[in-house]
Amino acid sequence: MKKLEFKQYVEYKVYAVTTIKKGYGFRVVLTFADETTMTKQHAGFKTKREANAERDEVVGQLRDRTYVVYDKIRVADFLTYWLEDVMRVEITSDSYDGYKNVVYNYVIPKYGKMYMSTLNQGYITNLYKEITDKYESVARIAKTVMKTALDYAKSKSVVSVNCAIGVSLPKSVKKTEYRVRKIDTQKTMTLPQVLTLIEASKDTPIYMQILFAVLMGLRRGEINGLKYSDVDYINRTLRVKRQLGKKPNSKAEDVAPKMLTKQDIPVKTDSSVRELPIPDFVFEAILEQRKIYEKNRRRRKREFRDWDYICCSSYGNPRSKSYHFKYYKQILAENNLPNIHFHQLRNTYSTLLMKNDFNVKGISNLMGHAKEIITADVYGDTQEIIEDCLYAIEPFIEEVMPIYNREEYYDYTDVFEMENLTDEYWIAA
């Protein structure tokens, strides 16, 4: 892969038009922050007037930061650098695989030898059409790739404009509504079914995963990435800031044994980093699970991996993305529950909230969506969207869960004698 380096100029000087070879032209000298310089020549104009017109244009570009500094970088070199050195560490393994397919199998074979600065909307349109003729789903990814890559190219003065902006996919590609999650209530559970699911999962290894999914709306990767250090025991809140998955291009030898698909990776979006109120029932389950964690840590001192994961094996190993599958399907079958995907427990969570008149914006924030509008066939009014409603979850939990005498139900003494709890989490008697 060709090594690319981009520097931003801090000063520039445009010389007057002069005779260059058999025509007219001018020179531009750029000075960078490290005090190095670059001289760029603009020549080949037949008349002095033409050269001066171009000079005026270049001065405007330099002032507006749209001047192309690196105009001799080929598409293949740039996209390879952008994918491998820039995006690979920023996106999930699945996203990387999709981007990689577009870059290496479609864009580079078609335009790889061209200079980035010569790309235009016509080329982008032809690319989308060619890909759409084969795979519509790949065409959608290609649109994201080209827009994102050219945004980066513009920021590094490789192109003057992002020519992918404004270019649509062919009309044959069905448009999807922007940031709209449509929930099919046929693939969610009712309140009685939620109660049955929770009760049936109590004696299984996926009990905590069920609670986090159906009572807090977390994604599978987020659930598996939760640690006890993410819990604020005083304010009873949970910080969601990571998920488990595979880092792009990582190999088994790069990580601990059996951890290739259980690496800490960023959550799906910036809005997915969030702090959630923990329902009392879930909070008590976390405390109980912590006691089990500490017990396993003491009795397996040599083998135990003290990585602090809430959902882990008796040896401290975090759970894989598919670990829940056999237990979950067995619970559904044995209790005559709807055969829905585990991820649809998250949809169940949001649908139940909507059925109980919680507003859409608050639900979106709880679930880690940025500006997403969640729609369902059970929610069709024009209820006012209110920003501050995150802590309205507790009444719903009280409705979902059976009523317990909390003083009789849980004794905190054993939990707060655990050796790993710090002073800031200590609760006075």
Image (spheres, rainbow, N blue to C red):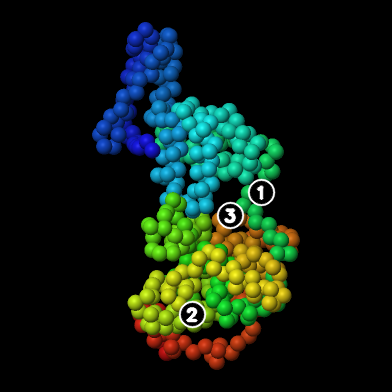
SS state under label 2: helix
- Mark 2 / mark 1, whichever is N-terminal: 1
Residue on which the image places disc 2: 289
Select label 2 or label 1 by which is in front: 2
| Percent of width and height locating residue 428 | 41, 87
What whole-number distance in Å separates the C-alpha atoms at marks 2 and 1?
41 Å
Quadrant the N terminus occupies = top left
The tag on residue 177 is 1
Of residues 427 and 410, the one drawn nearer to the viewer in this rendering:
410
Q: Is residue 48 visible?
A: yes
Of residues 53 and 106, the one drawn nearer to the viewer in this rendering:
106
The tag on residue 371 is 3
Residue at the spot 67% in from the left edge and 69% down from the top edge: 352
| Percent of width and height locating residue 216 | 57, 70
Residue at the spot 54% in from the left edge and 68% down from the top edge: 323
SS state under label 3: loop
